[in-house]
Amino acid sequence: MSIFLPQQTVPLQGTAVRRAASFNIASRKEKSLSASISYTTAPPRMFTSNSYTSAVTGSRRSSRVSLTQQPWYHNVDRSQGEVLLRNGEDGSFLVRPSARSQNALTLMLWFNKRLYNINIRHRNDGRYALGTEKPNEQSFNSVEELVQNYQSEKLVLYSGGERERTGRTLLTSTPLQSSELST
């Protein structure tokens, strides 16, 4: 028996993609059988901590994607994070555990030949925010939502706490996980 599966991918309007495959099955005792399959992939999903929102319908559904499974989360310390990001493109980032007990996570970001370590605070109201507490600060329901926001809205960067504004950038790319580097 032999099976041949060439695949075609055809972009459709919006975010859906039509995929098609043809195959031939032949055995010694029977004649060959041919068939083809065509299907449309589901629209992409925007993940949040325990649910996702469909990019097309806006409906929310349960999901089991944990923070540590996100491609931008790296279980590294500060010096290991610096090695991963140093000399990358502006906007390269990762989220790592924080060495400070009051801040569980840190956003590490490379911008303008400089590394930034920005605390991700879990506020008393259960929401997440960056840096030190500010009046009317922007906050998010999850770390995933925070990252997603700054992938489309520029993050304002400061040097020395909040003293000097040094630029604005999007979160653009993240280094490969160590498991991806070995493959």
Image (cartoon, rainbow, N blue to C red):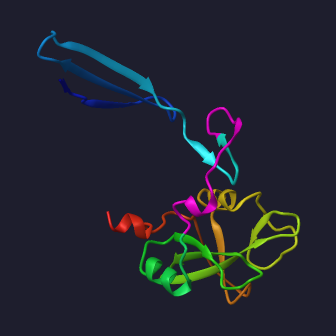
Q: Quadrant of the C terminus?
A: bottom left
Residue sticking out furthest to the left: 28
Let me know if residue 60 is in the magenta part: yes
Tell me residue 129's x, y (percent): 76, 69
Residue sticking out furthest to the front: 29
Residue at the image point whose x is 56% and y is 85% from the top: 78
Residue at the image point whose x is 15% and y is 9% from the top: 31
Tell me residue 70's x, y (percent): 56, 59
Residue at the image point whose x is 52% and y is 77% from the top: 111
Q: Quadrant of the N terminus?
A: top left
Total marks in image: 0
Let me know if residue 68 is in the magenta part: yes
In the image, which residues are magenta?
A: 54-73
Q: Is residue 8 above or below residue 162?
A: above
What is the magenta segment's predominant secondary structure? loop
**In-front residue for pair 109/180:** 180
Tell me residue 125's x, y (percent): 88, 64
Residue sticking out furthest to the bottom: 160
Residue at the image point whose x is 47% and y is 77% from the top: 85
